[in-house]
């Protein structure tokens, strides 16, 4: 009857082995719970940062769009100024050619031309051309500085 109340040595060894296996499994699961809890906290922190990151991204996208629009406007303005400069060059050349042809015509008709008067007119014309060119160059510089 005593043997029925106390387990045999084989049964005790078997139960101890099973207990050790259960303890090892419990420790492994506890470590896994700690690891998963840590990961969950990290992901929760990242998820709480997401709205701020989204807001920063939206702000940056708006700034980029605004800068792109400003760049396009300035590029268009530069093209317009280049067209103005080309037109001023053409007009200046035409005026100079007209002045030269007028002078040639007057000389061919043997009319006396006051040399000083012609020089003054030519000087004034060249001075005006230079003023126009400088104003165009200054306008370009101002646009490029902006």
Image (spheres, rainbow, N blue to C red):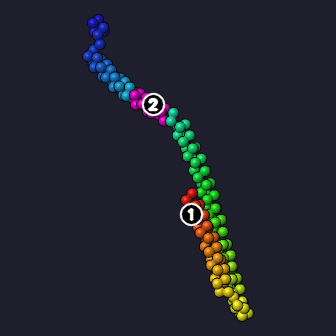
- Determine whether, in the image, residue 43 is placed left or right of residue 92: left
Quarter that holds the C terminus: bottom right
What range is drawn magenta here? 32-47
Task: Say which quarter of the image contains residue 131.
Answer: bottom right
The residue carrying pointer 1 sits among few (fewer than 14), some (14 to 19) or many (20 or more) residues within 10 Å by Cα, namely few
Q: CA separation, marks 1 and 2?
A: 56 Å
Q: Nearer the viewer, residue 130 or 17?
A: 130
Residue 128 % position (x, y):
64, 73
Q: Earlier in the sequence, mark 1 or mark 2?
A: 2
| Residue picked out by circle 1 | 141
Q: Position of residue 93 (x, y in %)?
A: 66, 79
Vertical arrangement, residue 41 with respect to residue 96, above or below: above
Residue 36 in sight from this viewpoint: no
**142 in magenta:** no
Q: Residue at x 69, y 79 (%)?
A: 95
Which residue occupies the foreground of this view, 37 or 6?
37
Q: Mark 2 sits on what residue?
A: 41
Q: Nearer the viewer, residue 58 or 131?
A: 131
> Does the magenta run of residues contain 37?
yes
In the picture, the disc for residue 80 is: none
**Helix, strand or loop for the magenta stretch, by majority:** helix
Residue sitting at x 26%, y 16%: 9
Q: How many marks?
A: 2
Of marks 1 and 2, the one in the foreground: 1
Left or right, residue 55 beside residue 21? right
Residue 19: x and y in percent read 33, 20
Q: Taking the image as drawn, is residue 92 in sight?
A: yes
Expressed as whole percent of the image width and height from the top left, the position of residue 144 reads 56, 61
Quarter of the N terminus within the rendering: top left
Secondary element at image label 1? helix
> Compared to 78, does 49 lie above or below?
above
């Amino acid at each position: 009857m005593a043997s029925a109340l106390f387990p045999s040595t084989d049964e005790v060894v078997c139960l101890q082995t099973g207990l050790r296996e259960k303890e090892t499994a419990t420790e492994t699961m506890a470590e896994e719970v700690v690891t998963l809890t840590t990961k969950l906290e990290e992901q929760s922190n990242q998820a709480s940062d997401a709205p701020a990151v989204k807001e920063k991204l939206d702000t940056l996208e708006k700034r980029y769009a605004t800068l792109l629009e400003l760049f396009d406007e300035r590029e268009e303005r530069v093209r317009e100024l280049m067209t103005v400069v080309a037109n001023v060059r053409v007009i200046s050349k035409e005026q100079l050619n007209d002045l030269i042809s007028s002078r040639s015509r007057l000389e061919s008709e043997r009319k006396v031309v006051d040399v000083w008067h012609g020089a003054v007119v030519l000087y004034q014309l060249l001075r005006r051309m230079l003023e126009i060119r400088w104003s165009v160059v200054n306008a370009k510089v101002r646009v490029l500085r902006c």
